[in-house]
Amino acid sequence: MARKEKILDVDATMQGSLSFSDPVNLRINGEFDGNLNTKGNLMIGEAAFVRAQIKGEVVAIAGKVRGTIKADSVKLSSTAEVYGDIETTKISIEDGAVFDGRCQMTGSKASLEEISDYLSVEKEKVVEWVEGNKIPVEREGSRLWFDRKKVDQWMAAK
């Protein structure tokens, strides 16, 4: 059975925290203040003004954002204005976009802390999965490294 696509279109003024544990297509066209923790696609429309800490998978920005962005993929369209830091594995910035901040490109390999944060689970739970050979992991001495693509495939199979 095909999974129904979840879409949430916000065209209002909101503040607080929005957190999604399941993938959703979230589009913000109004104002938002707070924290956004999303799975799936987050689109910030041209008329949007967002002041937030953003954590997500795919983040596309056409409006104004003030805050930090931590995502697998970030796209700034020509109308985007971003004032804040970005941490991502992939970034695309179109001509005309404004970006004032730092950008840190992360590789496909993630540390225990990063994968715990990425999966929104406690580090102890990830270690439990490693010890039970349940999650794909690479070892370099005492350090654990997780390939994000392999972890994504593992999560999709669960």
Image (cartoon, rainbow, N blue to C red):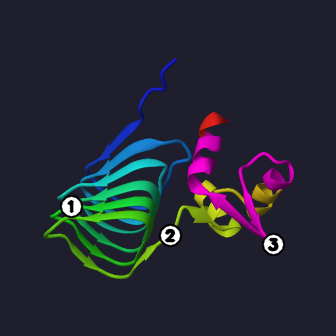
Nearest to N terminus: mark 3 or mark 2: 2
Q: Which residue is mark 2?
A: 106
Residue 103, given in percent of the width and then of the height, sits at: 39, 77
Q: Residue at x 38, y 74 (%)?
A: 67
Lower position in the chain sequence, tag 2 or tag 1? 1
Report whether 152 appears left or right of 105.
Answer: right
Q: Which mark is residue 77?
A: 1
Query: What amino acid is at disc 1?
Result: Ser
Q: Quadrant of the C terminus?
A: top right
Residue 54 position, x and y percent, is 43, 64
SS at badge 3: loop
Q: Secondary structure at mark 1?
A: loop
Please name the amino acid that badge 2 sits on. Answer: Thr
Q: Residue at position x 56%, y 47% from top?
A: 21
Which of the 4 image quadrants contains residue 13?
Answer: bottom left
Disc 3 and disc 2 in contact, CB within 8 angstroms: no
Q: Is residue 143 magenta?
A: yes
Examine the image and state in which quarter residue 156 appears.
top right
Horizontal arrangement in the rendering, residue 102 relative to residue 124 (left or right): left
